[in-house]
Amino acid sequence: MNNTQSCYSIHYEQTSAVWELSSLFLDLIPFQHDALVFCCIGTDRSTGDALGPIIGSQLQHTFSFPFRVLGTLEQPLHALNIIERHDQLKNEIQSPFIVAVDACLGDVNAIGSILIQQGPLHPGKAVKKQLPPIGNLSIKGIVNVGGFMEASVLQNTRLHVTYSMSDKIVRALILAWQRHLLKGKQNRNDYTDHYNRRQQIGYADFR
């Protein structure tokens, strides 16, 4: 794991990536917040830009993950609707804590890196679109190389890379939520279902 000015970087193929990501999420995401929202940005029309919608769909279909999710394969959150849906969210929920998730482009040596940083991300930056920043915490996945013909590069990104990174992020978020619940039970000395949850976490695939 690399840490540069509070920007954490973990490659999705490294050993124990899921566990390390979950530890960061556990520290940085306020799971106890009354209005925790995950905004998963991107479109299913581009293999590289589908990172967010894939994550959103998987989180939404996970029964044990109780938080609101915007941006799925069925209803993507993209450049054409993000301002309207973000404003709508702010009108519906007072002071939400938004975790923003999006794909991005970077150096060739950084492809596959998952970046976690406090503060908003700037959607559309990779394809030179001017959109307002979104999020209190950002999760970005570098899916391909940037610097030229960004829209075409995103459209021709290998789906394997996008899907594999999405899988690691989703598993890490779910694991972080489980660890948060377990931590709360330990703090309250409430051992109801404690053993079963600990076994579930203990036998998870953290790679």
Image (cartoon, rainbow, N blue to C red):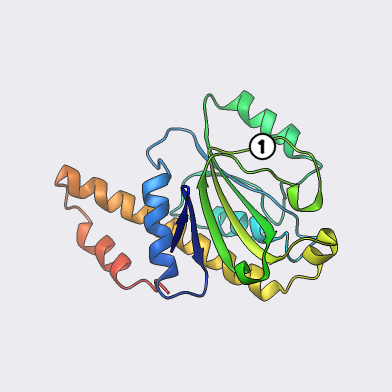
Residue found at x 81% / y 44% = 129
Measuring from the top left, give residue 105's x and y in whole percent: 70, 60
User: Closest to the observer: 108 or 97?
Assistant: 108
Residue found at x 22% / y 48% = 185
Residue at disc 1, secondary structure: loop
Quadrant location of the C terminus in the rendered image: bottom left
Q: Does 77 sit left or right of 60 as displayed? A: right
Q: Does 82 sit left or right of 138 as displayed? A: right
Measuring from the top left, give residue 200's x and y in whole percent: 31, 67
157 versus 39 height, above or below = below
As drawn, which residue projects farthest toward the left? 189
Quadrant location of the N terminus in the rendered image: bottom left
Measuring from the top left, give residue 165's x and y in whole percent: 58, 67
Quadrant of the rendered structure where residue 46 is? bottom right
Q: Amino acid at mark 1?
A: Pro
Residue of label 1: 133
Quadrant of the rendered structure where residue 56 is? bottom right
Q: Does 188 sit left or right of 46 as displayed? A: left
> How many numbered circles are shown?
1
Residue found at x 72% / y 50% = 76
Measuring from the top left, give residue 71's x and y in whole percent: 66, 48
Q: Does 116 sit left or right of 31 as displayed? A: right
23 versus 5 height, above or below = below
As drawn, which residue projects farthest toward the front? 5
